[in-house]
Image (cartoon, grey):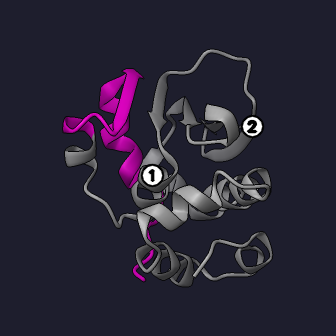
Amino acid sequence: MALDPQTLSGLPAADFVALVKGTSDDQIREDLAGPNRGEILDKVFARFPDQFRPDKAGDRSARIDFRVTGGPGDSFDTYAVVVDQGVCSVEKDPTAPSDLSLQLGPAEFLKLITGTGNPAMMFMMGKVKAKGDIGLATALATWFETPKG
């Protein structure tokens, strides 16, 4: 099944996880290299505030940039997930410096945020590159609810 911006709009979290799990890496790459890329990424990043668990983040503040590669003509898109005193927001094309920057392909990105991939293996194989506060990458996993699909 292809990733479609209209489908993603009202898709419950568990169904989103099942969709990612049931979509091949090649199909994800194809969908996120096409004309709907921006709209798909916008819908995916819009889920972060709803999945945020302020009780786990406590009073920490952090800026995490996600640089998602694999766009048309080898382009990339960058979004910042900003956690500040128990509130989570998302910025497209951020300009402020980040505490942690992650660079990854579209399939790795979706697998990472849905918990359907192995983050340690992705890092070891160079599919996810991190700069900055690496400890924050570990904490980040607990700050967001990962529904089971």
Badge 2 marks a residue whose secondary structure is strand
Q: Which mark is residue 143?
A: 1
Q: Which residues are magenta?
A: 123-149
Image quadrant containing the N terminus: bottom right
Dots 1, 2 in contact, CB < 8 A: no
Q: Quadrant of residue 117?
A: bottom left
Q: Amino acid at mark 1?
A: Trp
Residue 115 spot, x, y in % from top left: 36, 64
Query: Would you call the spot at circle 1 few (<14 residues within 10 Å), some (14-19), or many (20 or more)?
Result: some
Q: Residue furthest front?
A: 73
Magenta highlight on residue 126:
yes
Of 41 and 149, the residue lying toward us: 41
Mark 1–mark 2 distance (CA, rounded to whole Å) = 18 Å
Say whether disc 1 or disc 2 marks the residue closer to the N-terminus: 2
**Where does label 2 land, which residue?**
91
Q: Amino acid at mark 2?
A: Glu
Q: Position of residue 39 (x, y in %)?
A: 79, 57
Residue 96 occupies which quadrant of the picture? top right
Crowd band around label 2 with a 10 angstrom C-alpha radius: few (<14), some (14–19), many (20+): some
- In this rendering, position of residue 72 left or right of residue 36: left
The residue under the point 49% across, 26% down is 101
Residue at 77% x, 50% y is 38
Measuring 37% from the left and 53% from the top, which residue is drawn there?
142
Is residue 76 visible in the rendered image? The answer is no
Dot 1: element: helix
Side of 51 where 137 appears, left or right: left
